[in-house]
Image (cartoon, rainbow, N blue to C red):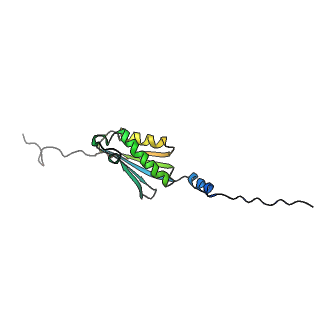
Amino acid sequence: MNEQEEPKIEVQSQEEIAEKKIEKERSAIIYINTTKNNTILTLTDMAGNTLSRSTGGQSTKQSRLKSSPTVAMLASKKIAEDALEHNINSFYVRVRGETGGTSAGSAAHAAIKSLGRDNFKIISIIDMTKTPRGGPKKKGGRRGRRV
């Protein structure tokens, strides 16, 4: 008689199922708004619904330090913890500095760098800083300067 092999049935535990869910790539958008006085980080899902928000003012007591790179790193750590709770592992980053400024500032760079160090995949970084067009109104009134 030929011995027939029984088919092997794989049983997965709850832990293995949870690991597979985490392995699936979920993306989110992080908006980083930097000003002279503060740094604001907002974590949203791909539809634009806010999942978490953190500012430099929540991370420090001294108002002069709210816009510093160190405090921006602390704020991004809080955002990273909230992203892990929502099983998010990749980000689209949108950075906005002050209107008319040359760059977003050192706080935004520090926040992005700390997110990269926390094993998150940064898919793209877009600078959305607004540029003024036309400039302020000319001096002299409607008929110009009269000599």
> Which of 4 and 15 lies nearest the eye of the viewer?
15
From the top left corner, tell me how far across and down residue 82 is, in percent.
Answer: 45, 52
Q: Residue at x 10, y 42 (%)?
A: 145
Q: Is residue 77 left or right of residue 21?
A: left
The quarter in which the C terminus is drawn is top left
Task: Tell how many labels.
Answer: 0
Q: Residue at x 73, y 60 (%)?
A: 9
Q: Residue at x 24, y 44 (%)?
A: 135
The quarter in which the N terminus is drawn is bottom right
From the top left corner, tell me how far across and down residue 126 is, in percent.
Answer: 42, 46
Residue 16 drawn above or below residue 72:
below
Q: Residue at x 48, y 40 (%)?
A: 117
Q: Is residue 49 left or right of residue 6?
A: left
> Which of 101 and 80 lies nearest the eye of the viewer?
80
From the top left corner, tell me how far across and down residue 18 is, in percent.
Answer: 58, 56
> Which of 53 and 125 lies nearest the eye of the viewer?
53
Q: Specify the farthest residue to the right.
A: 1
> Which of 124 and 141 lies nearest the eye of the viewer?
124
Q: Is residue 13 left or right of residue 132?
A: right
Q: Specify the farthest residue to the left.
A: 147
